[in-house]
């Protein structure tokens, strides 16, 4: 079954909708420049709305050790999603003992990782466009054919520009078994929509 991560959860509506839809992971963004940013305290309050359910993922961009420590002190995180290089990801995994997913921007097959290098998984997304102020897909879709036939060294999630309307096609074209959505389930920038979340999860699972 296709697994689904709903990232950028910053409201009770979004959190409850992701839980109700049966998402596998919920992502909290600990990056102040993001319109979806939350503090560790805010993430903890949202997470407390439902015990169990989706696993909690904390997204960090070039974090200091103290940034990760503060988040983990506020709430248990099942995964650290990191915008860092491979050695830094391995160091954070060793320091905190939490599985790490490394975000990788891809523009050609040569960008796809061939070795895990200490990571437990990867988030595969387009390279940011020129002038972007944030890493990540920035609502742009990856060329899904790039990953078709790739022998991934670990779990990987397809991200970038996914919506309920295109996720099935993306899964078929890319070979992904897990997908990551954020802006594609929002009614406005940073505002998650319960109906869009439900539709996305259903479309992914039906692919």
Image (tube, helix red, strand yellow):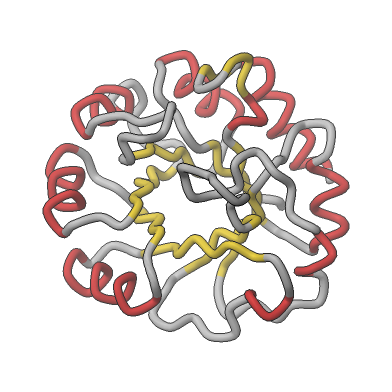
Left or right, 91 with respect to 53, comes to: left
Q: Is residue 134 above or below residue 150?
A: above
Q: Residue at (23%, 67%) from the top-left corner? A: 97
Please, which residue is most extreme toward the front here? 131
Q: Residue at (44%, 62%) from the top-left corner? A: 101
Q: Residue at (72%, 40%) from the top-left corner? A: 162
Marker count (numbered): 0
Q: Is residue 35 above or below residue 59?
A: above
Q: Position of residue 76 (x, y in %)?
A: 24, 45
Q: Nearer the viewer, residue 129 or 153?
A: 129
Q: Position of residue 73 (x, y in %)?
A: 12, 44
Q: Position of residue 115 (x, y in %)?
A: 53, 85
Q: Is residue 147 above or below residue 23?
A: below
Quarter where residue 56 is shown: top left
Q: Nearer the viewer, residue 89 or 111?
A: 111
Left or right, 3 with respect to 36, comes to: right
Q: Nearer the viewer, residue 39 or 131?
A: 131
Quarter where residue 47 is shown: top left
Q: Residue at (35%, 64%) from the top-left corner? A: 99
Q: Position of residue 168 (x, y in %)?
A: 84, 44
Left or right, 130 with respect to 51, comes to: right
């Amino acid at each position: 079954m296709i697994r689904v991560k709903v990232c950028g959860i910053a409201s009770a509506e979004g959190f409850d909708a992701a839980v109700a839809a049966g998402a596998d992971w919920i992502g909290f963004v600990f990056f102040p420049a993001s319109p979806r940013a939350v503090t560790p305290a805010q993430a903890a309050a949202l997470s407390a709305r439902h015990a169990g359910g989706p696993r909690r993922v904390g997204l960090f961009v070039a974090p200091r050790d103290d940034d990760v420590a503060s988040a983990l002190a506020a709430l248990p995180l099942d995964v650290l999603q990191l915008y860092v290089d491979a050695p830094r990801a391995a160091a954070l995994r060793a320091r905190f003992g939490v599985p790490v997913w490394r975000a990788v921007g891809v523009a050609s097959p040569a960008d796809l990782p061939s070795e895990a290098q200490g990571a437990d998984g990867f988030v595969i997304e387009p390279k940011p466009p020129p002038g972007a102020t944030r890493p990540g897909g920035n609502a742009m879709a990856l060329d899904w054919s790039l990953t078709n036939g790739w022998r991934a060294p670990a779990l990987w999630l397809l991200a970038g520009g996914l919506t309920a309307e295109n996720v099935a096609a993306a899964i078929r074209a890319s070979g992904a078994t897990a997908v990551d959505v954020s802006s594609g389930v929002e009614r406005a920038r940073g505002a998650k929509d319960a109906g869009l979340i439900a539709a996305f999860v259903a479309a992914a699972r039906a692919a």
